[in-house]
Amino acid sequence: MDVQHYGTTADGQAIDEYILTNANGVEVRIITYGGIITSVKVPDRDGVMANINLGFNNLADYETKSPYFGCITGRYANRIANATFMLDGTRYTLAANDGVNSLHGGAVGFNKRVWKAEAIEAEGEAGVSLHYLSPDGEEGYPGNLDVTVVYTLTDDNALRIDYTATTDAPTVVNLTNHSYWNLGGEGSGTIYDYIVWLNADRYTPVDATLIPTGELAPVEGTPFDFRIPKAIYPGQRSSFEQIVRARGYDHNFVLNRDDMTSMILAARIYDPACGRFLEVWTDQPGLQFYAGNFLNGTLVGASGRLYRQSDAFAVETQHYPDSLNQPNFPSTVLRPGETYQTSTIYKFGAA
């Protein structure tokens, strides 16, 4: 493992980059600004290495332009309706940074915070532990939330992310990582031909502002049925109302599971052109599958190429969006004496 200076924030804070490598030459780079994964280099079927994680080559762009590339997303990932929620009889008002809604923690979420880092090295793995104390009232959320996120790269080409959090007052929490993936190499082109399998019989339809309606709708007979592997296109450009509403796939899938604690295989995405695939394992109840609908060709990535619509996908493990306002969704409430704990594994391979 190597650690190097990555840059200095606009307000003068030094940012480090941790470079994790395994026995197979797989490399993951993570910076202390936002806990951002800036690069993931893995081999294709011919052993050719490429960075498959979208991002920038400088800190300033992450500070001012990033659509959540590679970051830790919180305190509350995804959308909260009308930027407000009730908890124990008290109404809390959040930053409305997505129209009338709150998105990914608000105006200055965890993606824009500087995290304290500590290297972790053990036999067959390398990692970094990131810590942040979110003060009571930050972005409108109650309670001092003490958060630790550990990234671990193993010799079986898996990147494990372990999240833990505690609070001194009742609060809500929903953490994820918001990496954008292009299995052919970042900036290499569209993901339309990727073959997707999602372990979900149902999904959560959204309204015009992309807030779940509360329905757990069956995927059968819709473009959201990925129970048998199929290409992203033509579903991504279909006339199905939910696809039109979100400009493509940008929906939470209700993962099939027998309990709420075990790790399950939630998704598998395969690029037939280069042979790389990504498996997602998680103990979370939901997964947001997003097909890069809002990339618009204005961002220049690390390779110097423009990122256009559907040039990447995201697979965000999570509780369902707006769960704190939806009583029929799994709870995201965390109370003093409890520990929020969840894990996700990104497993990389080629075939």
Image (cartoon, rainbow, N blue to C red):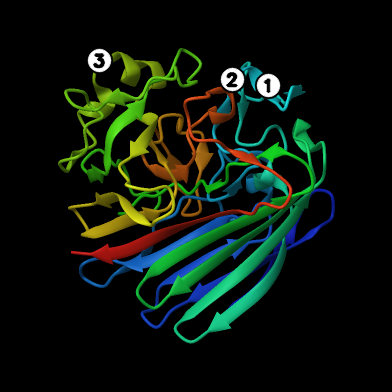
Pointer 3: what residue? 239
Residue 54: x, y in percent? 46, 50
Label 2 to label 1, Cα distance in Å?
7 Å
The disc, 2 or 3, on the residue closer to the chain's N-terminal end is 2
Circle 3: residue type:
Ser
Residue 310 visible from this viewpoint: no
- From the viewer's perspective, is the residue at label 2 or at label 3 nearer? 2
> Which quadrant of the figure contains the N terminus?
bottom right
Numbered label attached to residue 81 = 2
Give the secondary structure at mark 3.
Answer: loop
Q: How crowded is mark 2: few (under 14 residues within 10 Å), some or many (20 or more)?
A: many
Instruction: List x then y, in percent, for residue 22.
Output: 43, 79
The answer to whether the residues at label 2 and label 1 have Cβ atoms under 8 Å apart is yes
The residue under the point 44% across, 62% down is 40
Q: Mark 1 points at which residue?
A: 84
Q: Residue furthest bottom?
A: 123
Relative side of 105 to 223, left or right? right
> Would residue 205 be seen by someone viewing this image from the given angle?
yes
Q: In the rendered structure, which amino acid carries the disc numbered 1?
A: Thr
Task: Tell me, for residue 337, which label it has, or none.
Answer: none
Identity of the residue drawn at 56% across and 42% down? 68
